[in-house]
Image: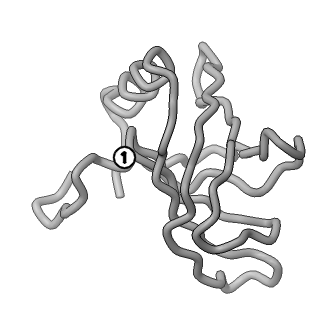
Amino acid sequence: MTSKEHRRTPRRRVPETVHVSNVMTEEIVGRLGNLSTGGLLLIASAPLVEDALYQFRFRLPGGDGLDIEAGAHLLWLDRASSPGQSWAGFRFISIPDEQRAQLRAWIDTPGAEYD
């Protein structure tokens, strides 16, 4: 992490393709761009509603393949350069303590790259 980092929690880059699904519709809404214990950057391939609440599920990369299910609030949305895609910033509003601990351990893994 550089000294220019202003976020409260570090955001780990997710270089692998990790699909994120909407729990309510079971549809894939996009893929992870980066991830922190407080939220995520989604590269969205489905339409999203600004300032809405979502229930997401995704699997952390790695040997354990840990599933995370979290409630998230869409804070901002910006059109991406690829047609049909957008960048979306979410804040987690609910995530089980055990999954948050697993997420924190994954983020803190040695050798990780951060945004």
**Up/down of 56 relative to 101, above or below:** below
Q: Amino acid at mark 1?
A: Glu
Measured as percent of width and height from the top left, residue 5 is found at 19, 61
Residue at the image point whose x is 33% and y is 34% from the top: 111
**Up/down of 52 relative to 19, above or below:** below
Residue at the image point whose x is 59% and y is 30% from the top: 60
**Up/down of 7 relative to 97, above or below:** below
Residue 92 lies left or right of residue 4; in this view the side is right
**Within the image, what quadrant is residue 7 found in?**
bottom left
Residue 92 lies left or right of residue 62; in this view the side is left
The colour scheme used here is: one colour
Q: Secondary structure at mark 1?
A: loop
Image quarter of the C terminus: bottom left
**Within the image, what quadrant is residue 29 found in?**
bottom right
Measured as percent of width and height from the top left, residue 31 is found at 69, 53
Using a 10 Å C-alpha cutoff, classify the residue at mark 1 as few (fewer than 14 neighbours), some (14 to 19) or many (20 or more).
some
Measured as percent of width and height from the top left, residue 108 is found at 31, 30
**Up/down of 44 relative to 86, above or below:** above
- State the residue in front, 10 or 57: 57
Q: Label 1 belongs to which residue?
A: 113
Residue at the image point whose x is 78% and y is 44% from the top: 21
Residue at the image point whose x is 37% and y is 22% from the top: 105
**Within the image, what quadrant is residue 20 found in?**
top right
Q: Residue furthest left?
A: 3
Measured as percent of width and height from the top left, residue 83 is found at 80, 84
